[in-house]
Image (tube, grey):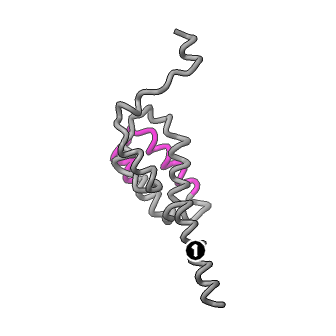
Amino acid sequence: MKDLSKIIKEAKEALNTINDGQTYTSTYVVKRFKAAAEANPQDQLICNMKEVLEKRASKQMFFSQKEVAGLYNEMYGLSGGQTAFRQTLSDLLPEGMQFLIQSLSPDWIKRKPLSATSVALR
């Protein structure tokens, strides 16, 4: 019976890792963002994400890759496609998202589909 509960516990941990990605201490994540912000002070995405993560770190001890990716997706528009995130912090994103981001060229990211509003204004 102990073996079965041990297997169930390990399976739940594996499922959490698959769903949420790796988990890092909030101290480690904030340190990485501070270093990236110091190296790229003009980068709106990195600097704004650093501020948000610093505030969240005061209330939680860990960040998952899924949480970092969610914040990245929410705030990406602030960068205007001009960010060093891919070069400095992409390893903090879930594995599938790391590949997607690294494979996109900056030219492709700058191209945005036309919305109905922007077409009507022309």
Residue drawn 56% across the image and 10% down it: 121
* Residue 96, image x, y percentages: 45, 53
**Residue 53 relative to residue 33: left or right:** right
Q: Is residue 106 above or below residue 94?
A: above
Mark 1 is on which residue type? Ala
Q: Nearer the viewer, residue 88 or 26?
A: 88
**Residue 107 relative to residue 73: left or right:** left
Residue under pointer 1: 11
Q: Nearer the viewer, residue 60 or 116?
A: 116
Q: Nearer the viewer, residue 11 or 43?
A: 11
Q: Quadrant of residue 28?
A: bottom left
User: What stretch of residues is rendered in magenta?
Assistant: 35-56
* Residue 47, image x, y percentages: 45, 44
Residue drawn 64% across the image and 84% down it: 5
Q: Is residue 48 above or below residue 15?
A: above
Residue drawn 41% across the image and 33% down it: 109
**Prevailing secondary structure of the magenta residues:** helix
Rate crowding at label 1 as few (under 14), some (14 to 19) or many (20 or more) other CA atoms within 10 Å: few
Q: Is residue 61 above or below residue 5?
A: above
Magenta span contains residue 52: yes
Q: Quarter holding the N terminus?
A: bottom right
How many numbered discs?
Answer: 1
SS state under label 1:
helix
* Residue 104, image x, y percentages: 37, 39
Residue drawn 59% across the image and 17% down it: 117
Magenta span contains residue 68: no
